[in-house]
Image: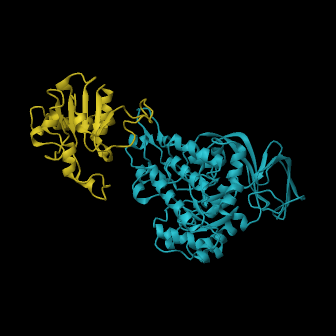
Amino acid sequence: MSDLTIRGGRVLDPANGSDAIGDIAIADGRIAASAGGETIDATGLVVCPGFVDIHTHLREPGFEHKETIETGTQAAARGGFTTVCAMPNTEPPIDSAGAVEFVIKRAADTGVVRVLPIACVTKGRAGKQLAELAELANAGAVAFSDDGSPVADANLMRRALEYASMLATPIIDHCEDPALAAGGVLHEGWVSTRLGLRGVPAAAEETMIARNIALAEQTGSQVHLAHVSTAGSVALVRQAKARGIAVTAEVTPHHLALTHEAVLTGPGESGALFYDTNAKVNPPLRTPEDVAACVAGLIDGTIDCIATDHAPHATQDKFCEFDHAAFGISGLETALALSLTALDLETVIERLTIAPVRTLGLDRKLEGLGSLSRGAPGDVVLLDPNAEWTVEPELFASKGKNTPLTERTLRGLVVATIASGKVVWRA
Amino acid sequence: MRSHLGELRGRKVVIVGDIAHSRVARSNIWALTTAGADVTICAPPTLLPSGLGRNDAPSEEPLGLPHVTVQTDLDVAVQGADVVMALRLQKERMSAEGGSLLPSTREYATLYQLTEKRMARANTGALVMHPGPINEGVEISPAVASSLQSVIEEQVTNGVAVRMAVLYLLCHRRSE
């Protein structure tokens, strides 16, 4: 592992409350007081801890045509992420120690950034029977989730929360009432009516969030709410936190910056309207009021952190009728710039570094993760927050070119990413 | 409507029935508001699409939704109407698979059937329309469907001609 020194940048380290021009040294893959080796000039750039994404779909094993651990971690590096938590909705699902070990081994062999596996709550992600949670945690799972689906059975969710509490490993729930959301493909509102497509009401998310808050209170165990998207959800979480309930929440960059109108494109020359399946995502993009509530919730700490819900898909999964298109946005490579359209730099960096680490308690296993503290993992990212660039999905490292941001000009460029002391991306 | 009423601007047209699942209603809402008619849609809330009659959508074409009045009470909706159009009710709307949108056809008929008594609240000589096929005794009473005010058969006949014309134009254009 080579040593290096990053000189002259604005070092922004929210974990330690520091923001000053300075140097950062990495020796033996860890943040050090000084180091030899290569010197990187960071004058005029922001230097901060590598980003941590607690909600990434790497698709391997099973859906390697959409993404692999290799391409997904390369996309992470381009986006400034040095740690990604891989969701277990693969084929087979990550519901056994062997499957967890597979992800860890593939990441060691082919990944360019750190991959922390999330394992299933239930066997086969089928929502019927608890997976062997203790064995999964021992194998290296940092959290449990049936993401893509909720744990719909309230009693099973209760038992999962109780059981996981002895493992100090949080449960992440994808909050969606299956009956209320059935058949819906975008937010239920005027856009769904305009396009004649079935909507998902905000209440589909909010009823499940309300249930999870009640269960977190009942069990005293932490529940983490994935991709919160409605004003009602933010209000529920705010109220629960005020009452001291162990609930945490994340929001995606696209729910901070885009509304359901992103689904509409056109009008074309004929005056006809079109839809963009690349804006089909679950939970769906919502109204301007919902977006404003998510931003406000992230600022005031109701929502703990930003997570990408990076959901890469192949062209054929999206190039079809709206009802048949897959849900998801390829988000790792646009996360920083898209978040900066809604929030200031300091808030974005905090919510992408130490905040997600604390949300899932990742620093219990990896001391100093998400910070530039001495001895912390040598994960550093160099940013030019003012540089403008145009989104060109064909240049993505991800196999998933599915983004509604094609040809949009954004501000905020990842100039270089260093993972465990190794330069893994340079613009 | 034009052949019976002439100018549509300012005319009150009521569309009653399953608006949420109806292509007839959607086409008519756009066509009639474009022609300047004053459109009221009438249905129980479970059969109304989200956003219609609210003001959160942009009002300007082509993005927005046309302005319509939403009324769940048919007795109120038909007051002063120049045209009342009933829509066919599909049987599956009552089942759990169909979304549990209605308790029964019986209750629907009580609340939303176009009857002679209700038509008496509309303007004298108001047109009765229905795109067909009709469930007599559900969304419309047999007497109203065959009344002198009814133009249903003419509407259905014209519908065939319009479809033929649209298909012809599309094919013809393609060959140019």
A46 relative to A77, above or below: above
Q: Quadrant of residue B147?
A: top left
- Chain letter, colour cyan in render: A
> How many discs appear?
0
Q: Quadrant of residue A413?
A: top right
Front-most of residues B87 and A18: A18
A408 relative to A228, above or below: above
Give the residue displayed 43% in from the left and 41% down from the top. A191
A409 relative to A48, above or below: above
Residue farthest toward the front in the current orientation of the protein: A243
- Where is residue B34 drawn, in percent x and y? 33, 28
- Where is residue B37 drawn, in percent x and y? 28, 27
Tell me if I can see residue A92 in this picture: no
- Where is residue A5 drawn, in percent x and y? 86, 54
- Where is residue A366 drawn, in percent x and y? 74, 66
Q: Is residue A400 left or right of residue A421?
A: left
Q: Which color is chain B depicted in?
A: yellow
A362 relative to A75, above or below: below
Q: Quadrant of residue A144?
A: bottom right
Q: Is residue A378 left or right of residue A304?
A: right
Front-most of residues B82 and A214: A214
Give the residue displayed 43% in from the left and 50% down from the top. A201
Tell me if I can see residue A211 in this picture: yes
Rendering colour mode = by chain
- Quadrant showing the N terminus of chain A: bottom right
Give the residue displayed 37% in from the left and 44% down from the top. A196
